[in-house]
Amino acid sequence: MASAAGLVAAMATGGDALASQTARAAGGGDGGEDRFARGELRGMWIATVANLDWPSEPGLTAAAQQAELVAHLDRAVELRLNAVVLQVRPAADALWPSPHEPWSACLTGVQGKDPGWDPLATAVREAHDRGLELHAWFNPYRVANHTDPTRLAASHPARLNPEWVLPYGGKLYYNPGLPEVRRFVQDAMLDAVRRYAIDAVHWDDYFYPYPVAGEEFKDDAAYERYGSDFPDRAAWRRDNVDRLVREMGGRIRETRQGVRFGISPFAVWRNKDTDPLGSDTRAGVETYDDLHADTRKWVQEGWLDYICPQIYWHIGLASADYAKVLAWWSATVRGTGVGLYVGEALYKAGDPAQPAPWQDPAELSRHLTLARDHEEAGGHIFFSAKHVAADRIGAMARVVADHYQDRVRAPR
């Protein structure tokens, strides 16, 4: 009992104090000692939205939540990974005591309720103590996985500024076309950069929402006010996202030296049939056209430090062959100075709903073998932590046996 009480007391320590205690040399986590040879990034995502990975359910005690988090970190070490990508802003809320947004409901079950500890501070400390980088994963524009603003905490910025929010596809989103929204979401994320010794800011693939058949994203008023200099609404929307990426990259560098900026988009920029510069794919979604995310431009302009396309397909898939998509991204980053890591669909391995290649424990290992032929590929990140832990058919174990015999440090 005394030990548990001490653990909870330690977890309740403020983020600023823990950040100063856990400040690490570049590369993170070893007090400046080069314990591991430098090499590739080996990471896993830890998703908190809807309690996908962690916490396993809302409302656990602070001690139980930390124990689960530490178990994920220990599993990463056991598999010789060197980075975790922890979702700390899943839906315009926070897993740290943010002055901008309420506490996330994934912790207590009630948005805005103090969980009694600082998860981000603890995650940074515990990850670094294990030689793991901590990439803080933020979702810029998603507000809620429902459309009822009254279900948000009373102090939520989306309730205080209802003109910022649009419903679409059964969810609520901040409107990317409003300059005040772009500034606010940056400020909210930069608070974590300023206060915690994170190794990177990481975004996923949600910019403008994925298209929903029969629905319109009703940003007419913002387009009428701000879009007159653009040939069409799509160009204006792409510029809005470009501004967010460019400005955030610059502000991260101004806020804390050494913190990298990475984005993990859907892996098809445009199909070759749409644009000769695109990949040899026939994907149903193209980020340039559907999400208004010009991922290729971000790399060319050097607005980010790494890109991690979610190449969530098997080798040989007719519409989006892993091998062809990887080759396209390797060529895209070549000579830009932007790092390339590959998002891997571990969650598909052994899923009976997936085609035959995903029933083979060796499929993911073949991805890493293939990536060896692309010198631009600097590592892999696996989705997600609960699948890393369960390893349904031993696909992760096969990756480790074939490729991760020794621990290495993440590249910088």
Image (cartoon, helix red, strand yellow):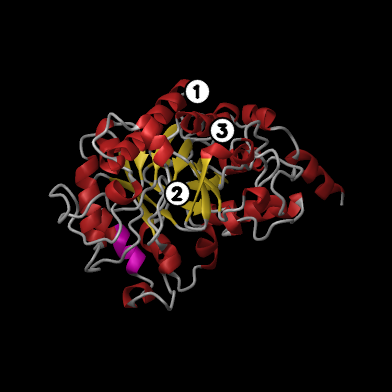
Task: Quickly name the residue at label 3.
Answer: 188
Instruction: Of the two numbered discs 1 and 2 on the same chain, state the one appearing first in sequence.
Output: 1
As helix, strand or loop, the secondary structure at mark 2 comes to loop
Q: Is residue 61 visible?
A: yes
Looking at the image, is mark 2 or mark 3 nearer the viewer? 3
Mark 2 Cα-neighbour bin, 10 Å: few <14, some 14–19, many ≥20: many
**Magenta-drawn segment:** 363-368
Tell me the tag on residue 407. 2
As helix, strand or loop, the secondary structure at mark 1 comes to helix
Tell me the residue at 17%/57% (across/down): 280
Task: Name the one closer to the observer, 299 or 67.
Answer: 299
Instruction: Of the two numbered discs 2 and 3 on the same chain, state the one appearing first in sequence.
Output: 3
Q: Amino acid at mark 3?
A: Ala
Tell me the residue at 28%/46% (across/down): 288
Tell me the tag on residue 255. 1
Distance from label 1 to label 3 (Cα)?
13 Å
Q: How many marks?
A: 3
Residue 210 shown left or right of residue 70 in the figure: left
